[in-house]
Image (cartoon, rainbow, N blue to C red):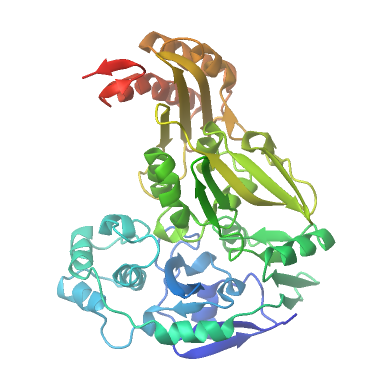
Amino acid sequence: MTDKLRFYLDGEIVTLSGIDPTQSVLDWLRYTARRTGSKEGCAEGDCGACTVLVGELEGERLNWRAVNACILFLPMLDGKALMTVESLKGAHPVQSAMVDLHASQCGFCTPGIVMSLVGRSMGACGTLGADPAEVLAGNLCRCTGYGPILKAAEQVASVPFDDAPVREALQKLHRDTLLVLSYEDPLAGLTRRAYVPCNVDDLAEILIENPDVRLIAGATDVGLWVSKQHRVLPEVAFIGHLMRDIEGTAQGVRLGAGVRYSEARAALADLSPDLGELIRRIGAVQVRNAGTIGGNIANGSPIGDMPPALIALGAELTLRRGETRRTLPLEAYFLDYGQQDRQPGEFVESVFVPAPKASDVVRIVKLSKRFDSDISAVCAAVHLRFDGAVVQGARLAFGGMAGTPKRATHAEAVLTGHPLAPERLALAAEALRADFTPLSDVRGSADYRLTVAGNILKKLWFDIQGQGGDVLGVAHG
């Protein structure tokens, strides 16, 4: 066991101990390291003014990710490399392009934009083949038009980067012992503790002995508890580096709970293009580079984007407590608002997503006020299996319609055993009123949610007709 947090920054190994385990990387940069280039705008991972790059070894490969430093906690840097705007010695080609094309005015947002584009020029996670507008969807600029910024991005698509020194340093930082950080908190009158396990067995043991430890993977949710709600978390365990395996077979894809959205996108898009598009709509690149599949499930949010889609596809969840594992349908995990079927000391280990048949119809629709980087008002997932032209099985799952992600069993019954037709879909849309009694909030009224959920089902017919080919056993032009 060790109490020394270590990470690599600009040619040096930074070693810290006795730190507040929920201090953000941004606060450490600005107030301790005096690196004030990274700015605090929203303090919730939306504006991108604090964007930094974090590098980590995956085998022999060094992978960089653009992330929001305002909701990244210091222990999440353990064994990794950090790059800030101050790390760009001299004028980086991205900075030169921003100047030459007049893409910066007040400059507050510029460091974050520069770091996102530097990441893109290095081939960082989530940027390969991505349109510049997608890469910059998590970077807001209130002064300029986005045209010059996008032109700067297009001008600097790739810049060579020698990562050998960083890889060598990270190999030396490899740790095979448990990291435990203790912090005396006089204001709260307690000693706060953070664990960084080096493997999943460590994690299982920690939770048996300390079942109330708060697990933090990407901190895209918990980060706001600290930055916005100023909550004190007495005991936490950082696990974003664990359970990162992706295993694809003909039967489907098994994802470790720690797999990030940006890493899962390709494998899930192979199951259904709509799944890949849904992930593109989750937050922005910085959020997808931090948030995890397992974290989105474990926190039980009624408006989490992934659970409705995974439920519709019949996903199964594996939970672990000590050496004991159990598997259950994902939909059974969500009991009620704020309640999940998870025992003390138990954690989400993986999720298996079955592959739909080639003849199945899978449609996933997210409705939000903004197209990019916004929370769902309604998320709908439809999975239909056919016997000829007759619906043999229907799985309809919705988020934002109840206290949990939930299947629409009445609407499913209306569709099952009948040929799909506009009239049948209209009946299913009406049946949603027996399945859900949604709340009204700032994202939409109850009537709006019921109406648009029904419209999604009605629109399904026109989507299928537009496919062309022999869908549902009927040739469509």
Q: Residue at x 69, y 69 (%)?
A: 197
Indicate whether 197 appears above or below 445.
below
Q: Position of residue 342 (x, y in %)?
A: 74, 45
Q: Can the viewer see residue 274?
A: yes
Residue most extreme to the right: 209
Q: Position of residue 449 (x, y in %)?
A: 47, 27
Q: Quarter of the image containing the C terminus? A: top left
Q: Residue at x 63, y 38 (%)?
A: 330
Q: Residue at x 47, y 78 (%)?
A: 82
In this orientation, which residue lies closer to the viewer: 254 or 94? 254
Q: Position of residue 121 (x, y in %)?
A: 29, 71
Q: Horizontal placement of 400 versus 138: left or right?
A: right
Q: Residue at x 31, y 62 (%)?
A: 141
Q: Can the viewer see residue 50?
A: no
Q: Horizontal placement of 178 versus 113: left or right?
A: right
Residue most extreme to the front: 250
Indicate whether 129 appears above or below 2.
above
In this orientation, which residue lies closer to the viewer: 457 or 125? 125
Residue most extreme to the left: 100
Q: Quarter of the image containing the N terminus? A: bottom right
In this orientation, which residue lies closer to the viewer: 299 or 273? 273
Q: Position of residue 54 (x, y in %)?
A: 46, 73
Quadrant in the rendering for residue 131? bottom left
